[in-house]
Amino acid sequence: MQPIKKSYFALGTLINLTVFAPATVADIEAAYHLIQHYEDVLTVNRPQSEVMTINHAAGRHAVQVSTLTYQLVKTAVKVSQQALGFNAAIGPLVKLWHIGFSDARKPSPEAIAAKLPLIDPQQIVLNDQQQSVWLRQPGMELDLGAIAKGYIADAIRTLWQQRGVAEGIIDLGGNILLVGQQQWRVGIQSPQQQRGHMILRLTTGAAAVVTSGIYERHLQIDGHDYHHMFDSQTGYPIANNLASVTIIAPDSLTADIWTTIAFYQGLSSTKLIAQQPNLAAIYVTKNQQIYLTAGLRAKVELLDTTYQIK
């Protein structure tokens, strides 16, 4: 099959979209238009987005939103309120540290402590009938950055299926969704080497393969590296021995959610993941150890022998 590939910059990252003939470039362009629409609605980096409208009304009133936004917020809040480590209300902390941006900084302990009461997902009120979202406390902010790419990738897959696209690769900055029945080979990025250096090769059928790592966005101060994934209990980046987590799941939104949960809970999350249907995980530690959930060993090939599969 002849691949047709186009690259774009959107969602703050490099987007690569690939289809195979008889699909055409029009299918890729339709997917890109969908990305642009979703970004306009869901991002916190555009003042007129629906998510920012919710945030601006925090502590004052509920905001009625589109079905698109409401369904994603509802999913995010439901998972957040289970206290597994995923938190859609993390916005005030993300903005305070601003890791990944030119004005990133390590805040004072007092500044961090002042934000902790504002990141409680129990303070998010949803109304299904009105399709509205209310943040109870002034200063609260939703941040759907951890799951927006997954939501959008799944929407592209649905769009392609409606357009008759049988095979394709949706790569939203390392958030990969494989469409079609063939066996795909996916490289797992080294957390310590330059982008493109792969430590593992995974063979899988149609699936989402989503990796989250400390190398993606980080801040170096006084010899200490602070990454962009936060612990809602402390207000600081999650502190454990993990360098990256890859989740393999039937859909990209599920994979997005579970990369965050797995990163927060560390290697102890293997038991929780084993209880979920059709979910698998690859953990890479800072000391170059690789841990796999059950059933993955036969599907991976080690490419970098400085790493060890446990």
Image (cartoon, rainbow, N blue to C red):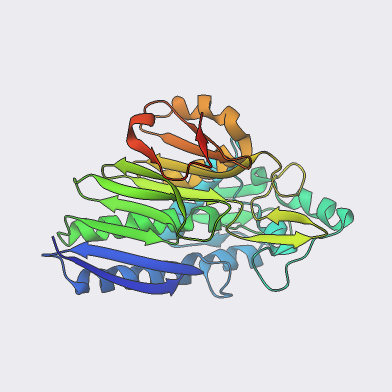
Residue in front for this viewpoint, 249 or 34: 249
Residue 147 spot, x, y in % from top left: 49, 53
Residue in front for this viewpoint, 281 or 11: 281
Mark count: 0
Q: Residue at x 19, y 46 (%)?
A: 182
Q: Quadrant of residue 274?
A: top left
Q: Residue at x 27, y 69 (%)?
A: 5
Could you tell whether 263 is left or right of 165 in the image? right
Asked if residue 260 is positioned above or below residue 139 in the image, the reply reads above
Q: Quadrant of residue 112?
A: bottom right
Asked if residue 262 is positioned above or below residue 165 in the image, the reply reads above
Q: Residue at x 77, y 44 (%)?
A: 234
Residue 98 spot, x, y in % from top left: 69, 65
Residue in front for this viewpoint, 51 or 169: 169
* Residue 104 visible in image: yes
State the residue lying farthest toward the front: 305
Could you tell whether 109 is left or right of 227 in the image? right
Residue 53 spot, x, y in % from top left: 58, 68
* Residue 83 visible in image: no
Asked if residue 283 is positioned above or below residue 180 in the image, the reply reads above
Question: In the picture, which quadrant includes the N terminus?
Answer: bottom left
State the residue lying farthest toward the left: 22
Could you tell whether 61 is left or right of 132 in the image? right
Residue 177 spot, x, y in % from top left: 34, 52
Q: Residue at x 44, y 74 (%)?
A: 9
